[in-house]
Amino acid sequence: MASQFKIVLLGEGCVGKTSIVLRYCQQTFNENHVSTLQASFLKKKINLNQQRVELAIWDTAGQEKFHALGPIYYRNSHGAVLVYDITDQDSFQKVKNWVRELKKMLGSNIALTICGNKSDLERQRTVDQAEAEAYAASVGAKHFQTSARLNRGIDEMFLDLAKRLVQQGAKAPKAQSRVSVLVEDDDVQPDSKGGCC
Ligand SMILES: Nc1nc2c(ncn2[C@@H]2O[C@H](COP(=O)(O)OP(=O)(O)OP(=O)(O)O)[C@@H](O)[C@H]2O)c(=O)[nH]1
């Protein structure tokens, strides 16, 4: 029987979470942004040294108003991919917030990957690569650069995470305390960027 692992993608709106999952699981890419409103998951089966592994990859909504839903998706996850956009410094700061939250809620029981997406936009880069890699190392995470658009780095990133989960014989972490989720207002105005992208 295949080992099954749950992986959650977290990160600011518009960084490319949905695009990464669709590229990895369905080999497709959409130039347009459709905000994720509810999380959903896709499955991907891979072989690791003759061992069958099934990944359930959860794509979550990145807009701030959905932040409170995060715990529902990360609390039973074996691994998390924290995605930022290499052209958007704020999205990198948001990754740091997610790392703090995951460490607080789950300890170090969740395998972390930090992903700088949109590597095809190198000329518009605002997040220093060396700094991002150093930060990832400082929190025990692996760092990858990807382009969902050009299909770069994505297979390698999930393969590395799957290998780590297999090696660790990952067990789904338990949240350290009861997680309560409060969604205050379904009608929040778009942020100052006027939505995203
Ligand atoms: N140039 C470039 N654009 C990308 C890449 N990945 C995603 N995009 C674009 O970025 C926009 C947002 O991508 P999504 O995948 O919808 O972003 P998301 O993080 O899922 O957004 P939310 O659902 O709001 O959280 C879309 O217009 C994509 O086409 C990439 O690697 N390179």
Image (spheres, helix red, strand yellow):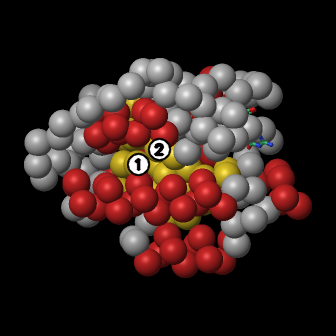
User: Label for residue 118?
Assistant: none
Residue hosting label 1:
80
First in sequence, mark 2 or 1: give its number: 2
Q: Residue at x 52, y 46 (%)?
A: 11
Up/down of 18 relative to 122, above or below: above
- Residue 185, visible in the rendered structure: yes
Q: Position of residue 34 (x, y in %)?
A: 66, 23
Q: Is 103 situated above or below 5?
A: below
Name the image quarter holding residue 134: bottom right
- Mark 2–mark 1 Cα distance, whole angstroms, equals 7 Å
Could you say whether the residue bearing mark 1 is in a helix, strand or loop? strand
> Which quadrant: the C terminus?
top right
Asked if the beta carbon under badge 2 is closer than 8 A to the nearest atom of ligand 1, the reply is no
Residue at image position (47%, 21%) is 187
Element marked by disc 2: strand
- Is there any visible trace of residue 50 in the rendered image? no
Occupied quadrant, residue 119: bottom right
When asked about the image quadrant of residue 164, the answer is bottom left
Q: Amino acid at mark 1?
A: Ala
| Ligand 1 under 8 Å from disc 1 Cβ | no
- Crowding near the residue tagged with mark 1, few <14, some 14–19, many ≥20 C-alpha atoms within 10 Å: many
Left or right, 124 with respect to 102, comes to right
Write the residue at 49% across / 51% down: 82
Q: Please state which of residues 24 and 13 is positioned toward the viewer in this rendering.
A: 13
Residue 10 tag number: 2
Horizontal and vertical percent position of residue 44: 48, 29
- For ligand 1, the image quadrant comes to top right
User: Front-most of 180 and 143?
Assistant: 180
Q: Residue at x 32, y 29 (%)?
A: 183
For badge 2, the amino acid type reads Leu
Residue 133 drawn at (x, y percent) = 58, 73
